[in-house]
Image (cartoon, grey):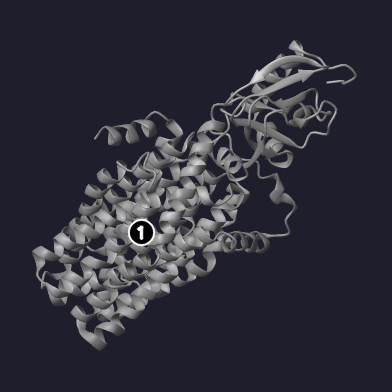
Amino acid sequence: MEAVRGAFASNLRSRDLRRAQLSFGAAWTAEWTLTVGLGIVAFRDGGAEAVGLVALIRLLPGALAGPLVATLADRMRRERAITAIGLVRAVAMGLMALVLAAGGATVLIYALAVVSTVAGTPFRAAHSALLPSLCATPEQLTSANAVRGMLDSLSTLIGPLLAAGLLQIGSPAAVFAAAAAASLCSALLVVRLQYEALTRSAHAARPGLLTDARDGLRALAGLRDLALLIGLGVSQTFTRGALNVLTVVMAIDLLGTGEVGVGVLSAAVGAGAVVGSVGASLLVGSRRLTTWYGLSIALWGFPLVLIGAVPTEAPALILLAIIGVANAIVDVSAFSVMARLAPDEVLARVFGVFEALIALTVGLGSILTPLLIAAVGVRGTLVAVGAVCPVLAALARRRLRAIDATMQTRDDELAQLRQIPMLRPLPMPVMDHLARNLARAHAPAGATVFDQGDAGDRFYVVADGEADVFGDGKLIRTLRRGDSFGEIALLRDVPRTADVRARTPLTLYTLDRDVFVPAVSGYAPAAARADAAVANMLATFHPRGVGV
């Protein structure tokens, strides 16, 4: 429980992080409320086939437009993209309520649902890309994702329960109105967040959104580990799409609990997710997040197999709650790891591709499920759909463990970089960028790392051993584990101002000039610390013949 309290405390202390998290909770409450209301309208219109068809029609345009729309979040401040998304969705949902209340054509309601979904597809991508910029360390990012997972779980519970309550006293029009209000709150909460956004100037030279979207796809294609995580993720979202239909059919046709039972079954997933979110908070600081991700993917499907074997209400509620637990772990583990595998400059686009695939596979699961039900029945469909995630997770198990090992090494290197005063103010995405580009070098005792007067091409951190610094032939200082050197030539664009020689066998972390200089000089606090450090060193020793 200490980890849980710490996760929430780190979010509550930050005004910007707190508002960003509440915005997410409001947006997802709106989504789940809308989903239940729209499912009821579609089922009244044409049964299970209509529910699946409407889900596909609603999600397919979002899947196609998602990667393109998500590029906007890499071109602008990401909270502005979130605000725009919330406003568009609020208007669309509000119009849905008015059309239904006025007895308008359901086709217009479906069209407005498509507008809402297309606008909302890049929301999680923008929010996922925003969170790292609001966090200082990987642990805080995991905490933020744990809190977001809790809010996701609460919205999975609150949204359907709100819809069920409104359906008891009113109609789906009231459900749509409530969803519109929640979406509006989501938009307003992130107005004027105060944080130092990453520089986006490079995007100005690009010819257009299509080029940016293509760059995001190329980045994803070049990151095999990220592609694997996304592949497992879409197997889970395919199952989720099937569950959207199965929930309605189970409640009305299999379990006999009626329309209100749709909300109750959905709420069971939410209740499990709330419990799972508490457990997922314990993952903060875990060095096996990717392994947990694979396990949670498997648990997304296996309970459906058991529901097919035991089609009674009480076991079904418990098993759906287990899916909710798995969903909470998926959110914390997946988005914490994915955010660190892709460069920040394409992060929103990579997440945009993921969200588009989510929309596509949710729609695919929704449209295929009625066909499976017609072919093998509800119970057979539960077994067939439920087997997908466990099988794929088992096949990916070894690679997931390897990703964990890679991330553990990076975390160790990142912790050492954090000890360097000039790097400490850098936001987490920049620190992760440095860690991704870190190389190792070795030098035997007595070897020269570089000579005074050499051109500067790298920044160095002592990982192990000792090195002596000589200026104009005199010993200036001795470097030990955690010390850094080489920044004067890089930041002042001058030749090396001293010799550095290995006193003992030496292991070094190195960063190329093209990585180090933009990272440090691009952020005022880091640049100020670096300038002060350089000035202090030059006050101690000023090399002859070098103007700095």
**Residue placed furthest toward the bottom:** 375
Query: In the image, 313: left or right of 459?
Result: left
* Foreground residue among 94 and 238: 238
Residue 55: percent from left, percent from top: 36, 72
User: How packed is label 1: few (under 14 Cα within 10 Å), some, or many (20 or more)?
Assistant: many
Label 1 secondary element: helix
Which residue is more in the foreground, 543 or 216?
Answer: 543
Residue where numbered disc 1 is placed: 294
- From this viewpoint, is residue 106 visible? no
Report x, y in % for residue 191.
49, 39
On the image, which quarter does residue 253 sit in? bottom left
In this rendered view, identify the residue nearer to me: 18 or 486. 486
Q: Position of residue 278 (x, y in %)?
A: 25, 43
**Left or right of residue 209: residue 539:** right
Residue at the (38%, 61%) spot, across then down: 397
| Vertical comparison of 180 with 444: above or below | below
51 w.r.t. 396: above or below: below
The reply to whether residue 372 is in sight is: yes
Q: How many labels does the image show?
A: 1
Q: Which amino acid does label 1 sit on?
A: Gly
Most extreme residue toward the right, as rendered? 545
* Residue furthest to the front: 445
Which residue is pictured at 13% across the width and 70% down the height?
Answer: 258
At x 42% / y 57%, what residue is drawn? 400
> In this view of the protein, which residue sits in the foreground, 368 or 473?
473
- Quadrant in which residue 236 is drawn: bottom left
**Quarter of the image that includes the C terminus:** top right
